[in-house]
Amino acid sequence: MEANPLLRLPSMPEDLARVEDELAEAVRSAHPELTTMAGHLAGAGGKRVRPLFAVAAARCGDRVGDGEMPIEVIRGGVSVELVHLGSLHHDDVIDEAPTRRTVESVNARWGNLKAILSGDFLLARASELATAIRPAEVGNEVAGLLAATIGKLCAGEVAELHSAYQVDRTEAAYYDSIEGKTASLFATAARIGAIVGGLPREHVDRLTEFGTAFGMAFQIIDDVLDLIATDEQLGKPAGHDLIEGVYTLPVLRSFELPEGDELRSLLGAPIEGDDWERARKLVRESGGVDSAIAEARSFATRAAEELQPVSHHEAGEALAAAASHLLTSIDAVHAA
């Protein structure tokens, strides 16, 4: 699969290396075991899309342009990545997930209590990093954005838990949940990069909307992949959403199709074995997957449209290409 277009920006290899250095420093603690736990998922890989968003957004303005990236932008992007990683620690406890990014999850290796505490440590380090950004008023704004984003993450997670096993879950409820759980992080990353990079407020707002639309497409695609991909392709157990009673957009769309009655009869309670396989098959073959992919395309198109004011910058073009590239991950799996 083609690499993320953001990585083709001439400065990005150097910027990404600085992100990795700052991330490694951020997860370090005076307690060796906490350092190991906090760095476990960070060291297991990840595309660093959120820090890349912050860096690319900053390069959409004249202050940074093609010059050296200010350390404040790098640290702003890393602070969002820390929130993301902390949320993964907590999510895996909630889901009792045994693996993440093809490695043993933090909760599986060290237990739920230490997974929660190490996740809290990452969230605290994110706030600490943000408040150190200068000038102080910018650091305070970034810290406030992160705090609001953490609140949205929690609200999105609670909304999802509230609707568990509900076959009458609405699409509006689904969208509210994924906007909080996923899209808010992409929006915050782009906004932080634009703010710290000194872009005009109109452009800051458009880049924020880009991040939101991109994040919505990203999560819909992730939800489709959960139904059609393998464990190896995902780097975590596939089909887990159905087991947990999380009925995502492809499932909700399938409920409205001719196969919907049979699918509803299988769901609404914990599921496994043949019933689980049958439910996945129904969603894959009903048209619900195709309908959800079309919705993801719509969000990706909207994301690219939000970049019109900064499209004359190379970084703006790369962000628009990243929105289109987002869909290649699902095209490859869906066509197989």
Image (cartoon, rainbow, N blue to C red):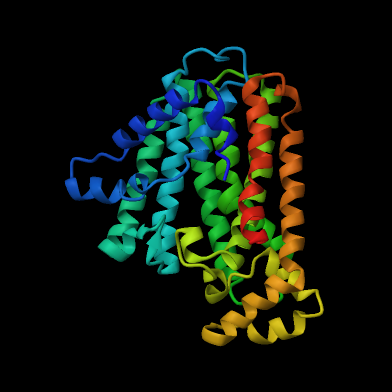
Q: Residue 104, located in which quarter of the rendered image?
A: bottom left
**Quadrant in which the C terminus appears:** bottom right
Q: Residue at x 65, y 66 (%)?
A: 248
Q: Is residue 119 left or right of residue 304?
A: left
Residue 28 in the image: above or below residue 296: above
**Quadrant in which the N terminus appears:** top right
Q: Is residue 170 left or right of residue 79?
A: right
Q: Residue 229, located in which quarter of the rendered image?
A: bottom right
Q: Residue at x 33, y 63 (%)?
A: 107
Q: Residue 23, located in which quarter of the rendered image?
A: top left
Specify whether residue 36 is in view: yes
Specify whether residue 166 is in view: no
- Residue 197 picture location, percent across and down: 55, 20
Q: Residue at x 72, y 73 (%)?
A: 285
- Residue 217 picture location, percent across and down: 67, 49
The front one of 10 and 53 is 10
Residue 228 in the image: above or below residue 312: below
- Residue 37 picture location, percent across and down: 27, 51
